Image: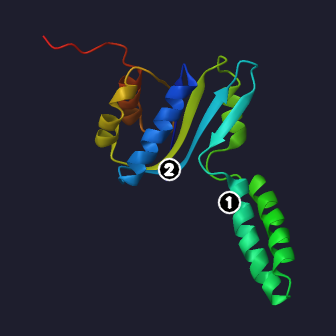
Amino acid sequence: MSDLVVVSFPDQELAFELRAELAKMQKSYLIDIEDIVVATRDEKGKVKLHQAVNLTSAGAVGGGFWGMLIGLLFLNPLLGAAIGAGAGALSGKFTDIGINDEFMKGLAEHFQPGCAAVFVLVRKVTADKVLEGLSEFRGKGKVLQTSLEKDREDTLRAFLEDQSLETSV
């Protein structure tokens, strides 16, 4: 079962940096991410979702391949590829995997202009190593919502929302 974590930031750059850092950690097998999206609200109040995977492009590539293959059977591979790419792009545009887009847009409607949030759907995590790797984000974000157990949510909240600076005596 996956857990949802939503973290907001006062500026969009931090949200994209967090997404990039989590992607690096996934490559190191410290976290297994099912879906990760950055939601932004621009100065005009328009909400935009920045998906990690462009489903329209992926659908077009897959559809083009299968269309060309079927087109070879009917001696017209170019027409088959064109029809397949169009159908694949259309199906990719209307496919929604992972986190519900309407949920993300609804939450992002309440952001101040210029703010952003990272929506992460996590399958597995090595929590202590991930938090250690995210030390540059300590005190810079706010946990908006999670489906984590209470103690894990409290640990994450304390880490991200910590405003105190540690000083050595």
> Which of the 4 image quadrants contains residue 75?
bottom right
Mark 2 secondary-structure assignment: loop
> Which of the 4 image quadrants contains residue 158?
top left
Whether residue 59 can be seen here: yes
On the image, the x and y values in percent for residue 14 come to 50, 27
Measured Cα–Cα span from mark 2 to mark 1: 24 Å
Identify which residue is drawn at 16% across, 14% down.
Answer: 168
Mark 1 secondary-structure assignment: helix
Identify which residue is drawn at 63% across, 33% down.
Answer: 39
Using a 10 Å C-alpha cutoff, classify the residue at mark 1 as few (fewer than 14 neighbours), some (14 to 19) or many (20 or more).
Answer: some
Give the residue type that dot 1 points to.
Ala
Whether residue 7 can be seen here: no
Q: Which residue is mark 1?
A: 58
Give the residue type that dot 2 points to.
Ser
Instruction: Depth check: give the residue in front, 81 or 141.
Output: 81
Identify which residue is drawn at 42% across, 38% down.
Answer: 149
On the image, the x and y values in percent for residue 41 come to 68, 25
Residue that sits furthest to the left in the current view? 169
On the image, the x and y values in percent for residue 112 come to 65, 16
Identify which residue is drawn at 69% across, 54% down.
Answer: 55
Residue that sits furthest to the top in the current view? 169
Q: Which residue is mark 2?
A: 2
